[in-house]
Amino acid sequence: MSASVLVICLATFGVAEARTTACFTPDEARAAHLRIMQQEFNVAALNCRTVDPTDPTFSGRYNDFVGKFGGKLQENAVALRQHFSRAGGNFDVWMTMVANDAGQRVITDASYCQQAWDNLDKVLAMETQDVEGFAVTAGVSHANVPACAQASPKVQKAKAPKSKAKAKDKSASSGSAAVAKAE
């Protein structure tokens, strides 16, 4: 029991670290969304059932997804490991966080299973090169993919030209100061 508590505490600490240290560039975010969508399909395969026993099962459809997109998923894992190597954080801790999030939502979101089924239907009908783009817009959780702040161009504030009246006043006062010194 205490070992389990220790693991949960360490995972929680790592999750907080993953959230604060690893922002995603647009390309990395696309890879992250695909991984999140895959995890959501995995959670659905483990937790959701079809009403009609003659319907295809989630697990069978998930296996079809992994079979069709296996190469893309391997590329995806490499890209995400590179991301965490560059940005800090830990890929495995991040994946645990993503899995825990999906595991909570399958329990609390009444539409989770239907959304996963619909998304899986759409994905299985598309080409490999389109799957990441779909994952970005498919309604999967975006909370675990913080975007890196875009550097905005540096703009200097223009100095306002001195008005002629202020310039005359300054020269007149400086001239009188010079006159006073000369006397």
Image: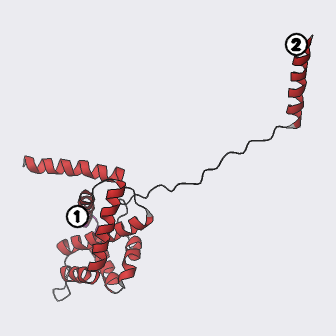
Residue 117, percent from left and from top: 28, 79
View extreme (top): residue: 183
Residue 53, percent from left and from top: 15, 86
Task: Give the residue drawn at x 35%, y 51%.
Answer: 21
Three-letter amino acid code of the residue under disc 1: Gly
Q: Is residue 155 visible?
A: yes
Q: Which mark is residue 103?
A: 1
Task: Give the residue drawn at x 33%, y 71%.
Answer: 34
Residue 173, percent from left and from top: 88, 22
Which of the two residues, 109 or 130, is positioned nearer the viewer here? 130
Query: Residue 70, located in which quarter of the rendered image?
Result: bottom left
Locate residue 51 relative to residue 176 in the image: left or right.
left
Q: Is residue 25 above or below residue 155?
A: below
Q: Which mark is residue 158?
A: none
Label 1–label 2 contact, CB within 8 A: no
Q: Helix, strand or loop at disc 2?
A: helix
Q: Is residue 79 above or below residue 52?
A: above
Q: Is residue 40 above or below residue 25?
A: below
Give the residue number, with chain letter if any, for mark 2: 181
Q: How is the image coloured?
A: secondary structure
Start-end of magenta stretch: 106-110
Q: Helix, strand or loop at disc 1?
A: helix
Q: Is residue 107 magenta?
A: yes
Which of the two residues, 154 or 133, is positioned nearer the viewer here? 154
Three-letter amino acid code of the residue under disc 2: Lys
Camera-near label (1 vs 2) is 2
Q: Is residue 111 visible?
A: no
Q: Residues within 10 Å of mark 1 (few under 14, many from 20)?
A: some
